Image (cartoon, rainbow, N blue to C red):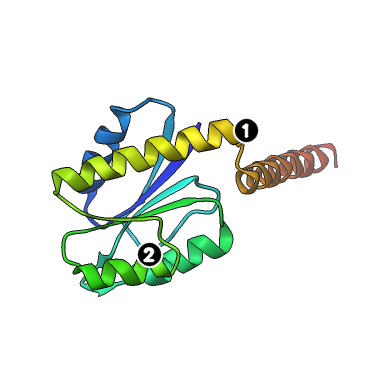
């Protein structure tokens, strides 16, 4: 399952993106965050450039790229000019598109499709960061259960 995080302060825009992506495949799990906070371990990040009229895109791209160098990062914007798109690509963004543009929507779908095919052809079925997080969560759960058992027996 490919994990996609949509980071956008517009809930309905995020829902529209999810609906478009489900047209490709149902092999995706989605995380939605209305704040500029990436979740570690996702495979694809779709990021809005503005949150409350503040541009967070470059900062978010760098944070994601530092923690997950193999992830695909897409910037979606309705307010940026082409110079800004180039700056974001230079700092590590894979794709920068304009919201509401039919040709750019097609670019996004093709990019996601290619990313999925590349992952499958290289045998990347599993995101290592996500596996580590899952193991940590399991260990924390076991430790909590052990504490509960010890407190009952005491």
- Determine crowd level at label 2: few under 14, some 14-19, many 20+ residues with C-alpha closer than 10 A: some
The reply to whether residue 113 is in sight is yes
Q: Quadrant of residue 93?
A: bottom left
As drawn, the label of residue 55 is none
At which x and y percent is residue 9? 25, 58
Label drawn at residue 123: 1
Dot 1 or dot 2, earlier in sequence: 2
Determine whether 66 is above or below 12 in the image. Answer: below
Image vertical order of residue 28 relative to residue 71, above or below: above
| Disc 1 packing (10 Å; few <14; some 14–19; many ≥20) | few
Is residue 56 visible in the rendered structure shown here? Answer: no
In the rendered image, residue 11, in percent from the top left (x then y), is placed at: 23, 48
Image-based side of 7 in relation to 72, left or right:
left
Q: Residue at x 50, y 47 (%)?
A: 42
Residue depicted at x 23% and y 40%:
106
User: Residue drawn at (31%, 29%), measured in percent from left and top?
Assistant: 22
Lateral position of residue 9 relative to residue 133, left or right: left
Q: Name the disc covering residue 89, or none.
A: 2
Query: Which secondary structure, mark 2?
Result: helix
Mark 1 element type: loop
In which quadrant is the C terminus drawn?
Answer: top right
**Alpha carbons under labels 1 and 2: distance apart:** 26 Å
Residue 103: quarter of image? top left
- Say which residue appears at 22% left-offset and 68% top-offset: 82
């Amino acid at each position: 399952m490919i994990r996609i995080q949509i980071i956008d302060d517009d809930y309905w825009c995020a829902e529209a993106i999810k609906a478009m992506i489900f047209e490709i495949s149902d092999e995706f799990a989605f995380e939605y965050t209305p704040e500029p906070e990436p979740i570690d371990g996702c495979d694809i990040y779709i990021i809005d450039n503005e949150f409350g009229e503040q541009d967070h895109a470059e900062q978010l791209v760098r944070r994601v790229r530092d923690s997950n160098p193999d992830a695909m990062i897409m910037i979606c914007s309705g307010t940026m000019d082409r110079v800004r798109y180039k700056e974001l690509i230079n700092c590590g963004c894979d794709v920068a598109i304009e919201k509401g543009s039919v040709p750019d929507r097609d670019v996004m779908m093709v990019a996601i499709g290619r990313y999925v095919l590349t992952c499958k052809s290289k045998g990347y079925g599993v995101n290592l960061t996500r596996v580590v997080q899952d193991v940590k969560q399991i260990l924390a759960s076991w430790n909590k259960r052990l504490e509960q058992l010890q407190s009952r027996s005491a």
